[in-house]
């Protein structure tokens, strides 16, 4: 903000059109006083003016000059007394109050200055420069809205007034009208870049309007000119952080804390940067400093809790989340409440988890994730029927693999309860519903077999024993019980065995030899399939891979390759079928989930595509291209915030320079 120059009293009188008839002797002394004032010989000027007043005691011009000399000497109270005399002698001259206001302004008495300038406005509305005086005082009083209004009134007439333009830009910044500030600074800089000085404010306004690259340009100039401008260093650090240039941001914070080690207000943002960079211990240390200085700011507790959660320190997480929520009082952050519920959920403190999930659902009764998580707690505590009700309701809203699988698991668990209580009718109903959902839990089939066995429905029992064993051949309990069941239901012939079936003994050596032969054949088929794939003989490659699967039917990589073949043949249905098979045999197979998501995206089924990409990230948070694909899916949905978030996360996992630049451009485009 520029300091307003004192308006000379002589100019006031010229503007007012007043004419003075001063006695010659007094006029002679007056002229001598003016000459002394010009030479800054104020004592002589005062003496001559005093002599002049002895001759002309009611002369307005002499009192005006006397007030001006006192003002230049810094004797403001005496100057004000002299102006009071002028006002009494010439009450219709409103321009006197310009000088009075200026004195008050120099004294820092901005309310009194505003009162004087308002008198000028009342008495001399044609004096346009008074809008500038009022605007300057408005700014000092932090009445930025009024300051902006009066600067604009002044500039409507004096549009090229540089100081007023600069002051208007600064007022826009102080008022939080950053876009308007940027417009003013753009024009000021374009007109005269060599004379431009307000780099720090310009850079800050650009930062607030998310023009980070340009903001960096001007903030770097600001700190080059004034290396001790701490605010500019902080703003520069934030700009670097927004662009993912975290090392540069860290360097700026180092400068800040070297210059101002006690500037603890910045520790929060510094902690956020450190946390984002994975420097968890340093982030925690800075959050603790911030909390010690600002114990009533819930954000410190919330963010330190987030870091503790990432480190798996759930007790510390819960402690800080609860403190943050206690500081929020009646206006509690429901997202934080949900995070707290999840912490208790992970700790298996289910009663508290339910308590906080209920609070979330009271505020957001349709929240999908909260309802799902609450159902998981019901499931974990044996309230299977309640969990099943919620799972079914969720699946009515949208197809979700996790919900689907948990519903199947709940049916299995409820079926087991009925099985143990010998309620075989309800047991088979529950196991049957799980099987209808294509559950991969072999116990559904085993439980069904036990229920049918108990009811003496032996053919059904046999069927489900065999299915259970086929699904989980390593579970000896299944085969042992099935053998016992067979022996108890099949008559055994005793006596002469001649001519009957002979026992066939397969030696371990012959078993191993057969296994090795299968392995050689399998590798040969895969090799042929790869060759045909590389030669683009896709149908032949599919046949090779399918023959290999006859030997190893649970090889998710081969299933994925077949899916890839169908995708290359533009057969999305076939691709989806085999990608699904790859994740059925290995639910944690990230490549299978990712490729399935790509096909769904190709079919414009964004919801299913996003589910797949989210599953990839859940299984492997470092699977970079899943964030990129997820960002594209959200962008197609028109969800810019989520698209931006995932593009930015992708940049932290990407090392390809061309891709990095391309995604940066995409981010800029979305942020406009």
Image (cartoon, rainbow, N blue to C red):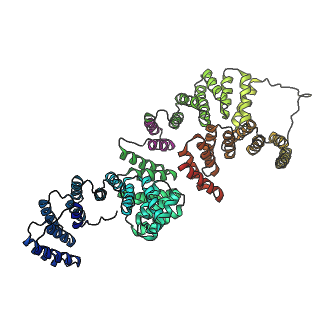
Residue 47 lies in what quarter of the image?
bottom left
Please state the extent of the stretch shown in magenta in the rendering.
333-360
Q: Is residue 28 visible?
A: yes
Q: Quadrant of the N terminus?
A: bottom left
Which residue appears at 58% of the width and 40% of the height? Answer: 637
Residue 15 rendering spot, x and y as whole percentages: 24, 62
Foreground pick, 516 / 14? 14
Foreground pick, 241 / 425? 241
Residue 298 in the image: above or below residue 162: above
Q: Is residue 140 magenta?
A: no
Residue 477 in the image: above or below residue 252: above
Residue 461 rendering spot, x and y as whole percentages: 71, 25
Say whether residue 136 is left or right of residue 210: left
Which residue appears at 58% of the width and 43% of the height? Answer: 634
Question: What residue occupies the far right of the structure in this picture?
Answer: 499
Q: Is residue 349 magenta?
A: yes
Q: What's the magenta bit mostly, secondary-structure-wise?
A: helix
Say whether residue 545 is left or right of residue 332: right
Which residue appears at 43% of the width and 57% of the height? Answer: 184
Which residue appears at 13% of the width and 69% of the height? Answer: 22
Foreground pick, 460 / 592? 592
Residue 396 rendering spot, x and y as whole percentages: 58, 28
Foreground pick, 232 / 581? 232
């Amino acid at each position: 903000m520029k300091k307003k120059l004192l308006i000379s009293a002589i100019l006031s009188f010229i503007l007012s059109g007043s004419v003075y008839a001063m006695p010659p002797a007094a006029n002679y002394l007056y002229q001598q006083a003016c000459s002394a004032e010009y030479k800054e010989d104020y004592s002589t000027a005062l003496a001559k003016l005093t002599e002049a007043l002895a001759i002309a005691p009611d002369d307005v011009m002499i009192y005006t000059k006397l007030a001006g000399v006192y003002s230049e000497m810094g004797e403001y109270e005496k100057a004000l007394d002299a102006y009071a005399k002028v006002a009494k002698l010439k009450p219709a001259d409103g321009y006197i109050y310009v000088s009075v206001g200026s004195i008050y302004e120099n004294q820092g008495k901005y309310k009194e200055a505003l009162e004087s300038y308002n008198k000028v406005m009342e008495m001399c509305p044609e004096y346009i420069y008074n809008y500038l005086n009022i605007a300057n005082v408005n700014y000092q009083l932090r009445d930025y809205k009024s300051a902006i209004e009066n600067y604009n009134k002044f500039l409507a007439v004096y549009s090229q007034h540089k100081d007023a333009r600069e002051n208007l830009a600064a007022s826009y910044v102080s008022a939080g009208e950053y876009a308007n500030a940027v417009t003013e600074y753009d024009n000021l800089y374009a007109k005269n870049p060599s004379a431009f000085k307000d780099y720090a404010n310009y850079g800050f306004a650009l930062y607030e309007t998310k023009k980070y690259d340009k903001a960096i340009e001007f903030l770097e100039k600001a700190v080059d000119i004034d290396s001790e401008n701490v605010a500019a260093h902080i703003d520069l650090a934030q700009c670097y952080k927004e662009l993912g240039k975290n090392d540069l941001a860290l360097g700026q914070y180092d400068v800040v804390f070297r210059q101002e080690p006690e500037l603890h207000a910045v520790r929060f943002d510094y902690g956020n940067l450190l946390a984002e960079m994975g420097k968890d211990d340093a982030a925690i240390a800075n959050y603790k400093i911030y909390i010690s200085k600002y114990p009533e700011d819930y954000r410190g507790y919330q963010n330190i809790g987030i870091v503790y959660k990432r480190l798996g320190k759930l007790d510390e997480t819960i402690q800080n989340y609860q403190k943050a929520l206690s500081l929020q009082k009646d206006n509690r952050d429901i997202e934080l409440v949900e995070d707290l519920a999840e912490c208790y959920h992970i700790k298996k403190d289910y009663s508290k988890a339910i308590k906080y999930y209920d609070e979330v659902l009271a505020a957001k009764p349709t929240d999908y994730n909260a309802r799902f998580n609450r159902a998981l707690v019901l499931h974990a505590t044996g309230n299977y029927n309640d969990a099943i009700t919620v799972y079914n309701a969720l699946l009515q809203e949208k197809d979700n693999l996790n919900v689907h699988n948990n519903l199947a698991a709940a049916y299995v668990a409820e079926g087991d309860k009925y099985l143990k209580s010998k309620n075989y009718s309800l047991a088979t109903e529950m196991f049957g519903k799980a099987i209808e959902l294509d559950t991969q839990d072999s116990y559904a089939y085993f439980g069904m077999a036990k229920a049918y066995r108990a009811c003496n429905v032996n053919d059904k029992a046999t069927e489900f024993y065999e299915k259970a064993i086929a699904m989980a051949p390593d579970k000896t309990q299944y085969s042992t019980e099935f053998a016992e069941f067979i022996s108890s239901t099949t008559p055994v012939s005793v006596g002469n065995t001649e001519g009957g079936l002979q026992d066939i003994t397969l030696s371990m050596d012959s078993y191993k030899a057969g296994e090795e032969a299968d392995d050689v054949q399998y590798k040969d088929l895969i090799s042929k399939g790869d060759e045909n794939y590389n030669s683009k003989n896709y149908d032949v490659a599919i046949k090779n891979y399918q023959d290999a699967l006859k030997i190893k039917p649970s090889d998710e990589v081969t299933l994925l390759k077949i899916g890839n073949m169908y995708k290359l043949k533009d057969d999305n249905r076939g691709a989806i079928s085999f990608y699904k098979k790859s994740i059925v045999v290995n639910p944690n197979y990230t490549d299978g989930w990712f490729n399935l998501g790509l096909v769904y995206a190709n079919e414009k089924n964004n919801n299913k595509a996003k589910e797949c990409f989210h599953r990839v990230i859940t299984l492997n948070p470092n699977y970079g291209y899943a964030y990129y694909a997820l960002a594209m899916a959200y962008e197609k949905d028109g969800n810019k915030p989520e698209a931006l978030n995932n593009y930015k996360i992708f940049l932290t996992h990407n090392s390809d320079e061309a891709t990095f630049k391309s995604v940066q451009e995409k981010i800029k485009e979305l942020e406009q």
